[in-house]
Image: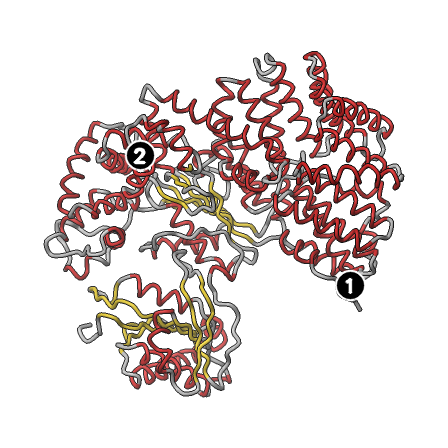
């Protein structure tokens, strides 16, 4: 190894695409093919002045002192491979990847992240393709061989989940250049999160888990907190992306503790929505039934009772596989449990040579994380034993090592070890029922906690009340109001980030957001629970989020509705936590919180969760003691079940709320209930006269009270009732008054529904240009708010319009997309809209193969694809 270059070098990785299939076809003759392949590559490497580093099977690893040398080698090798006559006329397609970085030698060869990056770049390519990193391209683009140019492929996330790499492709004259998209994360459906740090080690575990997922449908990674289960699961998912046609999706279960929320959480992670009163599990089973997918369910230990739900999902979806991370096994049939071992450790009593120390995973992790906080950090003869002993004392637990390495910013390894030893010694009297590794991890967090000053400790413990994340403002209000801790909250949060006790997370919000790792949050909750202030901090948390929900509620019907909906979505887990805490302590305020959230639940597709919360809270003792709050809860429950299509239940809730308002003498609130009740009668097949009477009674009260918003809503309601009755002149009169009122009031929700009604009116009357204007504006409003129930109807409006304009297949695609979205949202409103409008059932159009194919195309569209298709100008069809 002494003749291998060091410093800045360029690595080349190659391997044969489809080598297994070649071996199966050629049998013993494959050895001849492999030998010829290696000869051609070695000749090219030698001629370009490179060095062969390693060969394993059909893969080859070489290194070059300069990037132009490596590029010249790749070009000559591809040309030689293409020109060669292979046994039995076979074709040998070799993918190649080049990356320029630090050439650092260990006992077994090159070590470091640049080597892994080069290998990842090669793995992203296709047979016959040469991919270059940005660093290699910048050094070689000015001196490319004759007949060679570059194609910019843009940024791609390689399968180590870290930062994107800007990739380029060599275009070699006379050789193939039209390759599919690189085999990176973007090439396959997934939601795997970007990792701020690189993945280190675990090759054996990844190989074993790849095989386990291939052989089993339910694989569980088990181990105590801090073993790196989540990160390992994510990496396995990235490795297996190509294996699953419909993608790999990561589902974080850390924010929930209620087993009944498992199916709902997966539904929303997949971008679906709950289907009305239908159980979320059924919605999920239907969606997954024909899909080939891997779900990574993270932090399952909090809802281990839901293991049976995972089994039901697998039974319903034969091509689904599930990878679980949990501190304990699920103990269900078919489970393949894999305990996650500690990272590989050196023997600190008999250290290997210095250049071999970084071959051990735990040491490599420590070095990488220490370097990230202190770029000048390096393992030397003086600190090597301390580094090895730190890793050994921490039992190779990744989180513990990362916490210790974070101290390299200010402490040498010897000082870290000295402090760590003193803290760990105190753990011998700790809880004996905890696993030894968990005691060690607890000691590591203890040590990090003890390094904080008194005010930082208080803030750290208080921050643990937040679930799923927190903003700077919420931290200030809940944990440090008016600076009671004697410090600046942002400065303290920054300090906690530096000490790896809290993480800053990417966010589009105006303020920075932060999150605690789950194991650290649990530690903080234990510390907080032992403090006298615990109840006060939980109360502040609940009060803050109740106030947030109250502030957001009126904005759902105002021009800034989209930003407020997004704000509530961002803190939905905190709102759930606050609701759960209030439920047992103050049912009145819990009901207030749930009532304030109902419109969010309706618009964003959490109807089942909303119904469950509201009906449970209404049944609690004490919830009905305050009549005003009780009526608010009843109205919210009525709204949720109405949008689920349960009109009789909605009427019951609304009528009870109406009775309370009348007893209280609140005529305007009573008018709103009359308006709500009218909708339960305006459904085709019920009582249109009763709907009109109720609305007119409400309209009189709103006008007397000079309530412009209530008046406009009643005008829209009367317009809808007239539309149902076929009185188009009355519809135009009522909606002609409602539309400008909603614009003046800046109520996009009500305006969009008015525009939808005008749209189907003008479609029915043949005024197609006007119809298109109405439904386009409605679509824009609903899309901005991600109002799924509104998007269902407007997509169907576009379908009906396309049919009336003569574009039948376009109409079929849009109808299929609308009905698919309706199934996912459960609003059950399409049928109610068709009956009064005279709109035919689109499934009656499916009379030939072309129509059925168009339906399948529409059914396969995502929401965004369907919206884009609806807005696209229609084209003539053959």
Q: What's the residue at 18%, 39% (across, down)? A: 420
**Residue 767 place in picture, x, y as percent:** 84, 52
> Which numbered dot is residue 488?
2
Q: What crowding class fits label 1: few (fewer than 14 Cα within 10 Å), some (14-19), or many (20 or more)?
A: few
**Residue 63 place in picture, x, y as percent:** 29, 74
Question: Callout 1: helix, strand or loop?
Answer: helix
**Residue 621 place in picture, x, y as percent:** 57, 13
Q: What's the residue at 49%, 86% (across, down)? A: 174
Q: What crowding class fits label 2: few (fewer than 14 Cα within 10 Å), some (14-19), or many (20 or more)?
A: few
**Residue 461 place in picture, x, y as percent:** 33, 30
State yes or no: discs 2 and 1 in contact (Cβ < 8 Å).
no
Dot 1 corresponds to which residue?
850
Labels 2 and 1: the sequence-earlier one? 2
Could you give the CA–CA distance between mark 2 and mark 1, rounded to whole angstroms?
A: 66 Å
Give left or right: position of 586 versus 378: right
Please, is residue 487 above or below residue 213 in the view? Answer: above
Q: What's the residue at 48%, 29% (across, down)? A: 545
């Amino acid at each position: 190894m002494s003749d291998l270059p060091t410093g800045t070098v360029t690595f080349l990785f190659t391997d044969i695409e489809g080598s297994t299939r070649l071996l199966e076809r050629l049998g013993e003759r494959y050895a001849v093919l492999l030998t010829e392949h290696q000869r051609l590559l070695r000749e090219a490497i030698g001629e370009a002045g490179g060095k062969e580093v390693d060969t394993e099977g059909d893969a080859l690893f070489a290194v070059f002192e300069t990037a132009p040398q490596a590029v010249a080698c790749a070009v000559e090798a591809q040309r030689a491979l293409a020109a060669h006559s292979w046994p039995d006329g076979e074709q040998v397609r070799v993918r190649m990847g080049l990356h320029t970085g630090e050439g650092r030698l260990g006992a077994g060869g090159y070590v470091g992240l640049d080597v892994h990056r080069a290998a990842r770049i090669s793995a992203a390519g296709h047979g016959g393709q040469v991919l270059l990193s940005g660093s290699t391209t910048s050094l070689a683009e000015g001196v490319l061989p004759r007949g060679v140019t570059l194609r910019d492929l843009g940024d791609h996330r390689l399968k180590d989940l870290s930062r994107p790499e800007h990739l380029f492709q060599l275009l070699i004259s006379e050789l193939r250049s039209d390759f599919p998209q690189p085999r990176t994360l973007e090439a396959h459906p997934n939601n795997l999160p970007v990792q701020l740090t690189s993945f280190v080690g675990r090759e054996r575990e990844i190989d074993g888990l790849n095989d386990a997922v291939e052989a089993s449908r339910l694989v569980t990674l088990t181990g105590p907190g801090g073993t790196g289960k989540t990160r390992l699961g994510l990496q396995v998912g990235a490795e297996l992306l190509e294996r699953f046609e419909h993608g790999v999706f990561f589902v974080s279960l850390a924010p929930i503790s209620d087993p009944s929320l498992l199916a709902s959480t997966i539904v929303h992670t997949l971008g679906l929505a709950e289907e009305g009163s239908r159980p979320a599990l059924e919605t999920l089973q239907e969606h997954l039934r024909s899909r080939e997918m891997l779900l990574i369910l993270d932090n399952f230990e909090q809802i281990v009772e839901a293991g049976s739900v995972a089994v039901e999902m697998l039974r319903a979806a034969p091509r689904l596989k599930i990878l679980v991370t949990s501190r304990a096994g699920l103990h269900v049939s078919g489970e393949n449990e894999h305990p996650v071992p500690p990272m590989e450790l050196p023997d600190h009593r008999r250290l290997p040579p210095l250049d071999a120390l970084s071959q051990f995973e735990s040491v490599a992790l420590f070095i990488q994380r220490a370097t990230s906080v202190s770029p000048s950090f390096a393992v030397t003869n003086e600190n090597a034993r301390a580094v090895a002993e730190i890793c050994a004392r921490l039992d190779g637990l990744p989180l513990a090592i990362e916490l210790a390495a974070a101290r390299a910013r200010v402490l040498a390894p010897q000082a870290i070890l000295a402090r760590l030893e003193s803290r760990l010694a105190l753990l011998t009297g700790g809880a004996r029922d905890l696993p030894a590794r968990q005691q060690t991890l607890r000691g590591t967090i203890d040590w990090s906690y003890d390094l904080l000053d008194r005010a930082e400790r208080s803030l750290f413990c208080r921050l643990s009340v937040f679930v799923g994340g927190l903003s700077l403002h919420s931290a200030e209000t809940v944990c440090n109001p008016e600076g009671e801790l004697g410090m600046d909250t942002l400065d303290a949060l920054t300090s906690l980030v530096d000490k790896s006790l809290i993480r800053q997370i990417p966010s589009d919000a105006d303020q920075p957001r932060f999150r605690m790792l789950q194991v650290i949050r649990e530690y903080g909750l234990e510390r907080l629970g032992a403090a006298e202030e615990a109840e006060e901090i939980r109360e502040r948390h609940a009060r803050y989020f109740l106030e947030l929900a109250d502030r957001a509620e009126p904005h759902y019907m105002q021009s800034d509705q989209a930003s407020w909906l997004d704000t509530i979505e961002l803190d939905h887990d905190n709102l759930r936590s606050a609701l759960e805490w209030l439920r047992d302590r103050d049912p009145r305020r819990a009901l207030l919180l749930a009532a304030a959230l109902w419109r969010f639940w309706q618009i964003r597709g959490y109807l089942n969760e909303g119904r469950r919360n509201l009906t449970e809270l209404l049944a609690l003792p004490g919830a009905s003691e305050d009549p005003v709050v009780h009526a608010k809860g009843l109205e919210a429950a009525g709204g949720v079940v109405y949008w689920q299509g349960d009109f009789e239940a909605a009427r019951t809730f609304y009528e009870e709320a109406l009775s309370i308002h009348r007893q209280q003498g609140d005529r305007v609130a009573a008018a709103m209930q009359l308006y709500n009740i009218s909708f339960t009668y305006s459904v085709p097949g019920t009582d249109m006269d009763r709907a009109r009477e109720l609305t007119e009674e409400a309209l009189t009260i709103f006008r007397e009270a000079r309530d412009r918003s209530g008046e406009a809503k009643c005008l829209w309601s009367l317009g809808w009732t007239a539309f149902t009755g076929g009185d188009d002149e009355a519809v135009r009169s009522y909606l002609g008054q409602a539309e400008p009122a909603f614009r003046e009031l800046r109520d996009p929700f009500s305006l969009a529904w008015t525009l939808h009604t005008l749209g189907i009116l003008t479609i029915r009357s043949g005024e197609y240009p006007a119809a298109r204007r109405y439904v386009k504006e409605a679509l824009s409003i609903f899309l901005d708010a991600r109002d799924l129930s509104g998007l269902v109807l407007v997509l169907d409006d576009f379908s009906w319009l396309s049919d009336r304009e003569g574009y039948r297949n376009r109409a079929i695609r849009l109808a299929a997309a609308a009905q698919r979205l309706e199934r996912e949202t459960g609003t059950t409103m399409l049928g109610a809209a068709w009956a009064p409008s005279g709109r035919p059932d689109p499934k009656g159009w499916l009379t030939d193969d072309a129509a059925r194919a168009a339906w399948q195309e529409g059914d396969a569209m995502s929401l965004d694809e369907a919206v884009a298709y609806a807005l696209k100008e229609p084209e003539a069809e053959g």
